[in-house]
Image: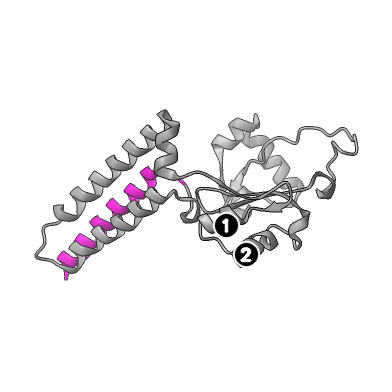
Amino acid sequence: MLTVLIRTILLFVVAVVAMRIMGKRQISQLQPFELVIAIMIADLATSPMENIGQPLLYGIVPILALMMLHSAFSIASLKSEKLRGLISGRPSILIKKGVIQETELRNICYDLNDLLEELRASGLENPTDVCTAILETSGKMSVFPHADRRPLTPQDMQIPVQYEGIPLTLVLDGEVQGQNLVTAGLTEAWLNDTLKSYGFHAPKEVLL
C-alpha cells in the first residue's frame, strides 16, 4: 500500500510540473496539440499507478518526452507562421460585416445553434447586431458588435479620464505582501497606519 501511495505522489508531482511548464492556459484555451498532450500525460501517469509491476520510469520518461515535444512545437510555432497554422489551425470568420458565413460553418461543422449560443453568451441576442464573429483556434468565440451598437465609452463622450494604475494586493489572508508594497512604493509603516484608520490593529486581522 505504501508503494502505491509513493508512486501516486511521484506521478502526480511529475504530471503537475509538466502541465505547469506547458503554460498557464485554461483547458478551454488549449491549442489542439496541447490538449492531446495533456490527455496523453494524464493517461501515462495513470497507468503505472494501477500496475505496480510496471516500472515507474515507464510513466515518467514518456511524460518528459511529451514536455520536450510541446516545447519543440511551441518554439517552431513562434518561428514559422505556416507551421503555426498547420499545428494550431487558423481562426474562422463565422459572421462577416453582419452576414453569417454559411460555407465556413459547414467547413468546420459548426451549426447555427452553437453560433447563437456563443452570441448570447457575449450578450448579443440578435445576430444582426453582430458585425464580426471569429471562432478562435482555442474554440473561443470573439464577437464584435456593429460600431453603432457598442456600449458608450468615455472616449465616445470625449470625457477625459485618469490612469487608475494596477490593483495590488497588500494584505492576503492576514499576510503582508511585501513585494507588492515595494512595487507600489509604499512602506509597512504606511500600511499599518492606514489599517488603523479603518479600525484594524494589525494586518493579521485583515482578510484582503
Question: Which x, y percent locates residue 63?
Answer: 25, 50
Looking at the image, which residue is at 67% across and 37% down? 166
> Is residue 143 located in the magenta-colored stretch of the structure?
no
As drawn, which residue projects farthest toward the front?
103
Q: Residue at x 24, y 58 (%)?
A: 44
Q: Residue at x 59, y 31 (%)?
A: 182
> Hey, which quadrant is residue 4 in on the image?
bottom left
Number of residues whose C-alpha sits closer than 10 Å to that of mark 1, classed few (under 14), some (14–19) or many (20 or more):
some
SS state under label 1: helix
The type of residue carrying mark 1 is Leu
Query: In the rendered image, which residue does mark 2 sit on?
Result: 112
* Residue type, mark 2 in image: Leu
Q: Is residue 176 visible?
A: yes
Give percent across and percent down for residue 104. Answer: 57, 53
What residue would you read off at disc 1? 105
Decide which of 171, 10 is in the foreground and name it. Answer: 10
Q: Is residue 93 left or right of residue 37?
A: right
Quadrant in the picture for the N terminus: bottom left
Give yes or no for contact between labels 2 and 1 (Cβ–Cβ under 8 Å): yes
Which label sits on residue 208? none
Q: Is residue 131 above or below residue 188?
A: below
Magenta region: which residues? 1-24
Q: Position of residue 70 (x, y in %)?
A: 33, 42
Of the pair 122 and 146, the residue shown nearer to us: 146
Q: How many discs appear?
A: 2
Q: What is the spatial separation of the Cα atoms under label 2 and label 1, in whole angstroms?
A: 8 Å
> Considering the numbered disc 2 on the image, is that residue within a helix, a strand or a loop?
helix
Badge 2, how many Cα within 10 Å: few under 14, some, many 20+? few
